[in-house]
Amino acid sequence: MEDKRKHIVVLTGAGISAESGIRTFRDSNGLWEEHDIMEVASPEGWRKNRELVLKFYNLRRAQMAEVEPNAAHKALSELEKAYRVTVITQNVDDLHERAGSTNIVHLHGELTKVRSSMDPALIYEWGYKELNPGDKCEKGSQLRPHIVWFGELVPEIERAADISRSADIFMVIGTSLQVYPAAGLMHYAPSHAAVYVIDPNAHELGAGPRVKIIAATATEAVPQLVQQLLNEA
Ligand code: APR
């Protein structure tokens, strides 16, 4: 049977996890937990120093195990009571899953997965464990984090664009919209779709006429907007 519910598409970035205790990228001056981003999140960095890259993501995985989804992640999962919801996240953490959202596209990969450094189709569930030099895929090559690094293609982008085209409501939460192609997704939303942008610095993000800017943090603004949308459903 056709699903007649309205489709809400939510694009999230580092800002939605900030209040869970995970630092955003661009709030730390190009340094990411004290590292130059290119050293730890690029194919060049991986070629130069695998140990450093593996250690960096081991720390991210360990940190993820210690934090909890916040009120914004949880509110988004409530939307599924009355809407068809797709969360397209740039985040590599699993806080949307743990908050109960069931339909999530991870544009930039997932910390809980690893993949072969030779064959990108060999992807494995890894959980919160450390990944170390010498951990290999079934074909014998070193495993790497299942993360889209700078300079790499974003395999899920076509699917995310198609999803965005079918939005009735489009929400953008906690992303500086500096990194393409993710930053362009809201422009695929059809002209009838209402667009909400939630970010304490949202006024800098360049709004169009149909964009409703909510300059507040995710935990302040998302539960309120979700309640409003549930009342309207
Ligand atoms: N609630 C909502 N938004 C917040 C909060 C908060 N509590 N705190 C900060 N923000 C906003 C910031 O104002 C900023 O606009 O979150 C945004 C975070 O932006 P970035 O650090 O650039 O993160 P993001 O947009 O997710 O980065 C995109 O870049 O580094 C790469 O691949 C990585 O997925 C990442 C991509």
Image: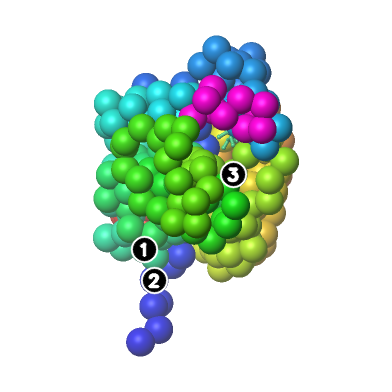
Labels 1, 3: front one: 3
Q: Is residue 218 visible?
A: no
Q: Is residue 51 visible?
A: yes
Range of magenta residues = 45-54
In the rendered structure, does residue 46 fall within the stretch colored magenta? yes
Residue underneath mark 2: 5
The quarter of the picture where the C terminus appears is: bottom left
Q: CA distance from mark 1 to mark 3?
A: 30 Å
Mark 2 residue's CB less than 8 Å from ligand 1: no
* Residue drawn at 60 percent across, 52 percent down: 118
Label 2 Cα crowd, 10 Å radius (few <14 / some 14-19 / many 20+)? few
Label 3 Cα crowd, 10 Å radius (few <14 / some 14-19 / many 20+)? many
Secondary structure, mark 3, is: loop
* Residue drawn at 49 percent across, 44 percent down: 143
Mark 3 residue's CB less than 8 Å from ligand 1: yes
Residue underneath mark 1: 83
**Mark 2 is on which residue type?**
Arg
Give me the disc on residue 46: none
Give above or below for 58 relative to 170: above
Q: Are marks 1 and 3 in contact (CB under 8 Å)?
A: no
Q: Give residue 18's position: percent from left, percent from top.
A: 43, 25
Q: Are marks 1 and 2 in contact (CB under 8 Å)?
A: yes
Give above or below for 57 relative to 148: above
Q: Residue furthest bottom?
A: 1
Residue underneath mark 3: 148
Out of 144 and 152, give the one closest to the viewer: 144
Q: CA distance from mark 2 to mark 3?
A: 32 Å
Q: Give residue 71's position: percent from left, percent from top.
A: 30, 35
The quarter of the picture where the N terminus appears is: bottom left
Q: Give residue 131's position: percent from left, percent from top.
A: 41, 35
